[in-house]
Image (cartoon, rainbow, N blue to C red):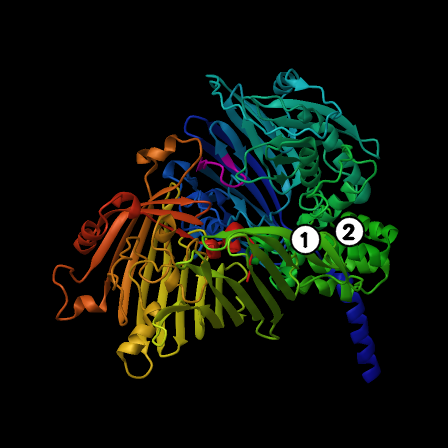
Amino acid sequence: MKKLLLSLCILICLLLPAYCQNNYWQQQVDYKIDVTLNDKTHTLDGFVKIDYHNNSPDTLYYIWFHVWPNAYKNDRTAFSDQMLENGRTDFYFSTGDKHGYMNRLDFKVNGTVATTQDHPQHQDIIKLILPQPLPPKNSIKIQTPFHEQLPFNFSRGGHVNQSYQITQWYPKPAVYDSKGWHPMPYLDQGEFYSEFGNYEVQITLPKNYVVAATGQLQDAEEKAWLDKKITKPVVCKDCDATQKPQLNREVVSSSISTKTIHFLQNNIHDFAWFADKGFSVYHDTLQLASGRIINAYSYHLPKTTAQNFWAASVPFIKKAVLTRSRWLGEYPYDIISVVEAEMGFDGGMEYPTITSVSPVNSAHALESVIEHEVGHNWNYGIIATNERDHPWMDEGINTFYDGRYQNMKPNAVGSKIAKPTFFSKRIPGDLTALAFKTLAAGKKDQPIETISENFSEANYGLVAYYKTGQWMKLLEAELGKTMFDSCMHEYYRQWKFKHPYPEDFKKVMEDVSGKNLDATFNLLSKKGMLPVVTVKKDWRFSTFFNLTETDRHHYIFAAPLAGYNFYDKVMLGAIIHNYTLPAEKFQFLIAPLYATGSKQLNGLGRLSYYWFAEGSGAKAELSLAGATFSANSFTDSTGKTNYQRFAKLVPSLKIVFNNNNPRSHLLKYIQWKTFFIREQDLLFTRDTINQTDKISFPFTNRYVNQLRFVADNNRVLYPYHGELQLEQGKGFARLAFTGDYFFNYPKGGGMKVRLFAGKFFYLGDKTYLKQFETERYHLNMTGPKGYEDYTYSDYFIGRNEYEKYSSQQIMQRDGFFKVRTDLLSSKIGKTDDWLAATNLTTDFPKKFNPLQVLPVKIPLKIFLDVGTYAEAWKKNADAATGKFIYDAGLQLSLLGNTLNIYVPLLYSKVYSDYFKSAITQKRFLRNISFSIDIQNINLRKLAPQIPSY
């Protein structure tokens, strides 16, 4: 009995996969759509009839519908949220006339009025409640009118003036398959999943529009009119030439009369169409290996300057079809088209039998995007995977074949061999590979098997596309090219016009090859680099930088370096380092500089080592930094100039906490630093025996311990930075919070709000001596000067100057007022108790900005500072000063906000009184302040789409 049961179990296990495959089912959804375009209001009015065939074993009581035009309805949609997360604010701040929506739906099912329910979360999904349950193996007829306001084309579809890209435009049932319903909101990052069916589409629009659409045009009159516009395609001759696309925006009046044109296509799962009055058309035929002849069309937008390489677009299309047909299986449709369209992004977008590409500047770029997008007719169009949940199955597999296409000899557009240049020797040809390696080395990549909306923007391209392509190469290498191609042919044969899942793809590969591929397919769910044969790195010297073959070499770089400060004058030297991509775990930088003024050796350096904690994923970095320069000078009565130097050594430990949400821009870390500082003072003494004055320059040593807690979110909308800092030195401690928040304006720019609150503590009793010794650490209402930069963390031209322009430099710290009261023995707003301030900076309105007339854009801003401090609230405080003080004026921000110039125009009476009494000449110019914020250059702002530590 036991043997019988065991045998039965084995038999079930063997037969179950075959049974499941034989019992595969999918719904059939056939469409008949009549639609009219109104190009004055940019609207569509349509009527759709749907034959919905329930081929599932389940009774359906409702059908989820996608009404994706409602993704553009307002800023409370998944599309809007994702655009912000990916760094785009154009839709969020767009005006209502650029929004889109779909309404006037009135569903009937088999002639009976049917109700709908809103999706609990998404405005662009609705549930159609069926008046009667739909049993298995039965069908229903669904119909509804619809009205659509076309949006400005922010993403794939809409309009740009009277050029129309009509995509994802009709009410469409979500897929119901063996895993259930798949309702999904429209997203920019993340594509689609729809049911196969037969389409009959009738389009009415002004007569002088050229229409490119999915499927076969049925109207003889329209075909004859289109034939007259066709230009004969040619093979590209000057393929290396580049030319920036200049679209012709000249308005062409629409015909008063209209036309109605018809398109038919079977076995597809979407329908897109494009209309423009200025399309140029190219056409040719193509014979496939079976002998079947198909039509190839391309349409491009009117240009103010001719882009002759578009004449080669049809040969590019033909080559793409032939190669994919050879590698996967013959193209099944009778037409293939490419249309140029502005889509809100660079690249292309695929639809059955037609693909759109954005304007490009060369034949190489055109061929590349055409080849990729035409390739999607196989992996997306014919093999219709769930792109939203498994983007690698179309984008990654297609990218693999892109690589095969690019490696064909001779090259498709035969490029000229260029002479190596400075940059080409140092920058790898495959920057995508370098970007992925950098991301993976920083533990910021994600598994290939990740749903689209969970990918960070960088990982969507680098993992779903690039890494999957590399994984396919690994699979090809494991199976051998001949066997791999046989597997892919069988995959195409079994799953064309169907919806395979990853397990279906794996089964085909294993069944055909006879191999167990668990180990290879398990890599889809793992982070990091794919297995490669590693080689022991050697050491190599290079000038400046080198990003090539960083997996084979440890580089040491050297480059000339120059610097300047008021005391050392011009400094010349070199920088020696090993900074590259991906980052080495051990990094070093040494920069010796010879000062032509002080005739001394200066320099700076840094050593660091980082590692990742197991489990938490936190990154820890241990570092040691140092620097030595002249900080002041003194010329004695003999004319000899003596230079007062400083040197610092700074050990540090930084722990960056892992962010579990890859799409978040939030960076949190804690950092400990100890500053060991040695400074040379100026000391006057009296020799009482010889009755002479003595000048000496003794060294003193001090330390500052610093603990920082930082949260930084560089999201595109309302970014912020918060920092809590605790510092301790001999006899004191100071606690400070600094917060920055940026409020975006709809038309660009915005207002930055900075909040500061600080408290100073004496360790032990407060004495006059201790008060004097800690004076440089006290809280400042004005941005501190060089002497008050007690950790030597900012760059100052003249750190201890009190005259000329170098004395007007301040740093961004504490109250950060822009007015200075340097000539007072106790500066206004300086305190050894507590201080609070708010700093507002806003962009100057463009229409009132006098600098707008200049050919170079110079940002002009308005600043306002308001603050208070402990002494202002004491009983014996000067009533004229008031409890709150302020200043306001204009700010000029140059070199990406690295150099900021402040012109105070309004300020409290206490400042006005000081200026009148202490500054009698050139008051306006001497009141100007500036800051140089080299240390604030932030790579996260330069490349916000790449997650970083």
Query: 234 or 420: nearer the eye?
Result: 420
Mark 1, residues whose alpha carbon is within 10 Å: few (<14), some, or many (≥20)? many
Q: Distance between the Cα atoms at labels 2 and 1?
A: 32 Å
Part of the protein shown in magenta: 147-158
Q: Give residue 421's position: percent from left, percent from top.
A: 71, 40
- Numbered label attached to residue 434: 1
- Residue 696 vertical placement versus 105 (above, below): below
Picture quarter with the C terminus: bottom right
Q: Secondary structure at mark 2?
A: helix
Type of the residue with mark 2: Tyr
For the N terminus, the image quarter is bottom right
- Left or right position of 814 against 384: left
Q: Earlier in the sequence, mark 2 or mark 1?
A: 1
- Residue 216 in the image: x percent, y percent? 66, 29
| Amino acid found under the numbered disc labelled 1 | Leu
Q: Nearer the viewer, mark 2 or mark 1?
A: 1
Query: Is any atom of residue 464 visible in this view?
Result: no
**Residue pictured at 81% horizontal, 44% vertical:** 327
Relative image position of residue 448 (x, y in whole percent): 66, 59
- Which residue is drawn at the image coordinates 12% and 59% (left, top)? 880
Question: Is residue 806 positioned above or below 155 on the image?
Answer: below
- Name the residue tied to disc 2: 491
| Circle 2 crowding by C-alpha within 10 Å: few under 14, some 14–19, many from 20 | many
Prevalent SS, magenta region: loop
Determine if the magenta segment contains residue 154.
yes
Decide: is 415 above or below 126: above
Percent x, y for residue 349? 61, 40
